[in-house]
Amino acid sequence: MLEVTDLKKSFVSPEGGRVEVVSVAAFALAVGEQRALRGESGSGKTTFLHLIAGILAADSGGVRIDGVEMTALGESQRDRLRADKLGYIFQTFNLLQGHTVLENVLLGMGFGPRGADAAHAREILARVGLGHRLQHFPRQLSTGQQQRVAVARALANRPRLVLADEPTGNLDPRHGHESLMLIREVCREHRAALLLVSHDERALQHFDQVQDFAVLNRPAAEVRS
Ligand SMILES: Nc1ncnc2c1ncn2[C@@H]1O[C@H](COP(=O)(O)OP(=O)(O)O)[C@@H](O)[C@H]1O
Ligand SMILES: [Mg+2]
């Protein structure tokens, strides 16, 4: 359901040269597959997920989701496809601080195929243990609770593909464990594919399939100017 081919991305370095950060020849996920990528900080994991989600434009290469070539789409079509098919759990949550817990999930759903379905938003928030915090604002929640809002928002549209960027990075071990169990369980229920990137061995232990990102991602070593 996800196929990545010859995907490349470089950034302009502070010295003015270009540094290649992502160069992935081939990567694929099947429907419902759950896979983790292990990679140290700065190895390009977040950039890779941003490229898959179309948050960042690749320099070259392809990203196919459910048979649709994302890189060939215009911006608005890509936004719609992302809302339809993708759930993204950001490392830093990216919650809207001026909106309540319920609104954060509803606003995320509003762009998706089912629209803002309040009953379903409440249900998924209850599922992540926040049924009693619907009217709270993000700043009134603990870090673990904020992360659960981010999880609920990412899963509310029953996405086909869930991308999770170090989802345990800001959590203590117990909450990290609970959060991962929940993400994996909801993905299994909907047969959503899950791609998680992390350097946290405790998180990686949850997965049968762990791939070293440094083996997959082979950016050119030299700085080109
Ligand atoms: N917008 C950007 N401009 C320049 N360099 C960037 C940008 N985004 C990321 N980088 C660089 O790309 C490398 C990989 O970053 P990132 O994908 O965030 O790694 P990871 O998520 O594995 O920690 C880092 O060296 C980072 O400094
Ligand atoms: Mg990162």
Image: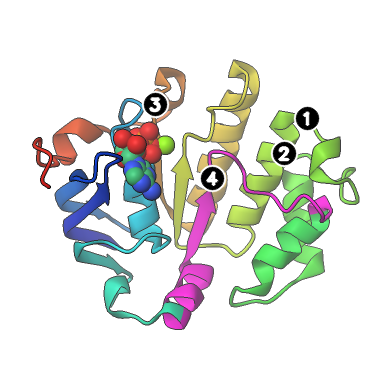
- Ligand 1 location (quadrant): top left
- The residue lying toward the viewer, choosing from 188 and 23, is 23
Q: Which residue is mark 1?
A: 142
Q: Position of residue 104 (x, y in %)?
A: 74, 57
Horizontal side of residue 17 vs 182, given as left or right: left
Disc 3 versus disc 2: nearer the observer: 2
* Element carrying mark 1: loop
Q: Residues within 10 Å of mark 4 (few under 14, many from 20)?
A: some
- Identified at 73% across, 72% down, the residue is 116
Q: How many marks?
A: 4
Q: Position of residue 78 (x, y in %)?
A: 42, 75
Q: Tell me whether circle 3 and circle 2 mark residues in contact (CB < 8 Å).
A: no
Please, what is the three-letter code of the amino acid marked with disc 1?
Ser
Q: Residues within 10 Å of mark 1 (few under 14, many from 20)?
A: few
Reply above or below: 204 against 136: above
Of pointers 4 and 1, the one earlier in the residue sequence: 4
Of pointers 2 and 4, the one earlier in the residue sequence: 4
Quadrant for residue 108, please give it.
bottom right
Q: Which residue is mark 3?
A: 204
Q: Which mark is residue 90?
A: 4
